[in-house]
Each structure stands twice: as structure tokens, then as C-alpha cells.
Amino acid sequence: MMKYLQSIGRSLMLPVAVLPAAAILMGIGYWIDPSGWGAGNPAAAFLIKAGSSIIDNIPILFAVGIALGMSKGRDGAAALSGLVAYLVVTTLLSTNTVALLQGIDAANVDPAFGKIENAFIGILSGISASVMFNRFSHVQLPAALAFFSGKRLVPILTSALMILVSAVLYFVWPAVYTGLVSFGETISTMGALGAGIYGFLNKLLIPIGLHHALNSVFWFDVAGINDIGNYWAGTGVKGITGMYQAGFFPIMMFGLPAAGLAMYHTAKTARKKQIASLMLAGGFASFFTGVTEPIEFAFMFAAPLLYGIHAVLTGISLAIAAAFHWTAGFGFSAGLVDFVLSSRLPMANQPYMLLLQGAVFFAIYYVVFRFLIVKFNIKTPGREDDVEEAETADSEAKTTLQTDSTGNKFAAMAHTIYEGLGGKQNITSIDNCVTRLRVEVQDSSAVDQGKIKATGVPGVVVTGKNSIQVVIGTQVQFVADEVKKIHETR
């Protein structure tokens, strides 16, 4: 079950990765016309509407993205089926259709059906489509119906399945919706404390990839909060809308880079050069784009105490920003790009104070991390006992990179990682998300973690007897492509 939920979280990253496009378009539009929201400038209106075309259709992106990401071979037929599934259920359960079925006026229909076009339905549609694709994409029908065999059969069966799903949701959705709204309202009525609890849980769920499920409740229109959508659309309450986003900026732009600096300063002298490159790259990614996994996975499992403190500090940061009503928003993550683009949006409220808060959190992270690492001799990167062995392996990896016949550094890195994973006889499947190479193996104990880490990757995570994650960073796609090429030719 956990493995399946992780797969959903991984697939969600594909549609979520589209959001920066909306952030750039709407951010520039609001920057041009921050008060008129496009009414006073045609160019601003053009950009804002272009961005909203993405934000307003997040559920469709989820349906297509999850169907694609969870289907075998990531086939386009699965993506089409995800769209079909979404269209069927949202049409059958729309306010007007329900009014027709119940024989009442649309104004008297349960308000839950007015919110049927949401991220939850998008996720459900994507999952349903992927299941149908994986099960029926190779079915052969009799000769008379041969045209509809295989992949062409999947959208048809998916639409039939969603009719049944719609029938169930017709009775279940009002109760589910009420439960989601109650959960969201419980947290939202807690004000700054609720924001802090959300921030804390967000970080605790990252290791198992379930933070996306939590985020969807607060960031999107699953329970009526829709913090991201309302912030960028300017339809919320100034100083309130954005409270589930703002507190992440001090952490991602300042806190985690400071943690990286502390780990660099406490690394053993022989490893400082290697750790410097790791932390510099991870710190820049966190500060500039809000991608935190390269740093977080560097100490998440090696130093769970530090990661627990990181989760607590994240919660405190969100609580402080919410308490003082300092707000800023993001389309992708809480990095410098989104901060600059969102700072002139109508819902932005004293965003510069988040920079001051960030400076304070920089000091807190650095002092706390450095003190605890030294005090308890925590084995953060560069402080491992097997330094000499790691240095030898690192030298071997560098030699491999220099002598690889392709002249491609990613190909060289992929060859070493592939061998460390056990090669053809151990690897059963290869996939990747935004920052991690995700591999299914016959036996995780046969994986040579030292050899993989020697390539300079932030970390290797064993998530099960047959599951391995290699944390690489934002260039993971290039490495994953090379690993797949090697696997296909062996």
C-alpha cells in the first residue's frame, strides 16, 4: 500500500512541474498591473489570463499526469484515458446534471456537486485510468472488433468504469466533501497554529512522498482552501490567503542553505572539498528554485534528529508568518524566482518581512545544526567513519568519469550507478521523479551503496526489500535516461 501511495506522489510531480509556467506568466502580468489585475493594461491581462488557464485547470493536469505517470511505459493512451475519466465523472456529477437527475432546480442541488471539478477527482480519475491501462492495454478482441483492441480499448473501458464510479460518488461525494471541508476548516480556524501544524507534517511526510496528498488539501481546491489558486487569482483575503505558503520561503531560501553551510563547516578536512560542491549545489537549488531534496536527503536518514528539528522549525516558520500576516505565494516552490514573481500580487502582504524572518532562520539553522552535529558527533555528510574508503571510491568514480568513451558525464555517472545497483540481473524497473532515480530491484541487499555514493549523489535510500531511491538532484532526468539506455542494451 505504501509503495502504491509513493507512486501516486511521484506521478503528481509531473503536473505540479507545470505550475512554474503559470507563476511566470501571472507574476509578470501582476507586476505590470498590480492594482488593476490586467484591467489597466492589455499586455498584463494577456499574461494573467494565460497563467490562469493553467491554474484553473489543475484537476485536469492531475488526471492526465497521474494516468501517464502510473501507467506501464508511460503511454499516451493512458493520459488520454485520464482525461476521458475526468470528463465523464465531472459531467455526470455537475450541478446541472444532478439537478436533471433529481428533477429539482440547480439552485437547490447540494453544494458539494458545485465543487466536483477538484484535485481529488483529478487524482481519482488518473488512478482509475492507469489501472485500466495496465490491465487492458494488451487485450485482443475478436476479429470483428479488432480495431478496438489493445490501447484503443482503454479509453472505452475507462469511460464505462467512471460511469460506475460516478454512481458511487453520487451518494458518497457529499459526505466525502463534507469531511474534507471539516478537516480543512478545523486547521484553518486554528489560524497560525494550524499553519504551523501543517508545515510540520509537510516535512515529516517527505521521506515517504505523501506530502503531496497533504499539500493538495491546503494548496488546491479539495477542501475549499485553495491557497495557491486564490493567491494567484487575487480572490482571497489579504494577509490570510497565502498563509500555507509564506512560511516556506524563510526555510527554503535561508534555513536549508544555512544547514548545508553548517554541514560543510563540520565536515572532516579531507572531505570538505567534496561536501562543498554538494552543499553549494543543493543550497543554490533550495534558494533559487525551492527544490530542497538534494539537501534534505543528504541528512534525512543519516541524522534523523536534525531532520526532526528541521520539521519543527518549518512549522514554527509557517506559524510566525501566519501570525504576523506576512504573505507571499508560489506556483512551484518557495524559492527566489517565485518570491520575486509573487511579491507584487494583490494578495502579497509585507513579503519583505519574510526576508528578515529568513535571515533570522539562517542564523538559527546554522547555530542549531552546527552545535548538535559537533555535540553529538552526528554523522552528517563528510563526517562518516569510513572516510578513506569513500575517498578511494570517489577517486575511482572520477577516473570513470574521465575515461568514459561517450565523453558524457551523465553517461559515466549512470554506468557507475547502474553497476552499483547490481546491473541487469538485479534491476527490474527504472523510473525517476523531479530529483530522485527510483529503481525496483530483485534484492536491495545486493546494491553497493558505497559505489553509488562515490559518484557524488546526495544519498541512497532503501525504501523496501525491492525498492531503491538514488537522490541526484534537478539533473536526474539526464542520468535516468542514460541508466535506461544501459539497461535496454544489456
Image: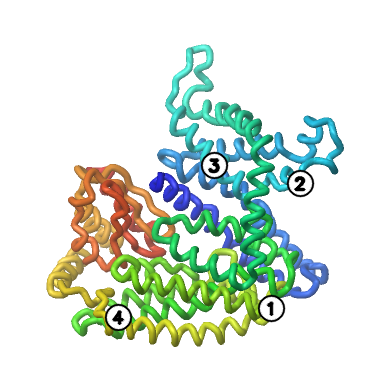
| Of callouts 1 and 4, the N-terminal one | 1
> Compared to 280, does 21 lie above or below?
above
* Mark 3 nearby-residue class (10 Å; few <14, some 14–19, many ≥20): many
Q: Secondary structure at mark 2?
A: helix
Q: Which residue is mark 4?
A: 373
Q: How many marks?
A: 4
Q: Position of residue 379 (x, y in %)?
A: 25, 74
Q: Quadrant of residue 105?
A: top right
Q: Are marks 2 and 4 in contact (CB under 8 Å)?
A: no
Q: Look at the image and tell me whether residue 249 can be seen.
A: yes
- Which residue position is annotated with label 2? 111
Q: Read off the residue under disc 1.
A: 349
Q: Are marks 3 and 4 in contact (CB under 8 Å)?
A: no
- N-terminal of the pair, mark 1 or mark 3, is 3
Q: Residues within 10 Å of mark 1 (few under 14, many from 20)?
A: many
SS type, badge 3:
helix
Q: Earlier in the sequence, mark 3 or mark 4?
A: 3
Q: Earlier in the sequence, mark 2 or mark 3?
A: 2
What is the CA distance from the residue labelled 2 to the residue labelled 1? 31 Å
3 vs 4, front mark: 4
Name the residue rendered at 69%, 59% in the picture.
Answer: 52
Q: Tell me the kind of residue under disc 2.
A: Pro
In the image, 348: left or right of 261? right
x and y, in percent, of residue 207 in the image: 39, 60
- SS of the residue under disc 4: helix
Asked if the residue at tag 3 contacts the one at tag 1, i.e. Cβ–Cβ closer than 8 Å, the answer is no
User: Could you say which disc has been placed on residue 126 in the image?
Assistant: 3
Of 32 and 446, the residue lying toward us: 446
Nearer to us of marks 2 and 1 is 2
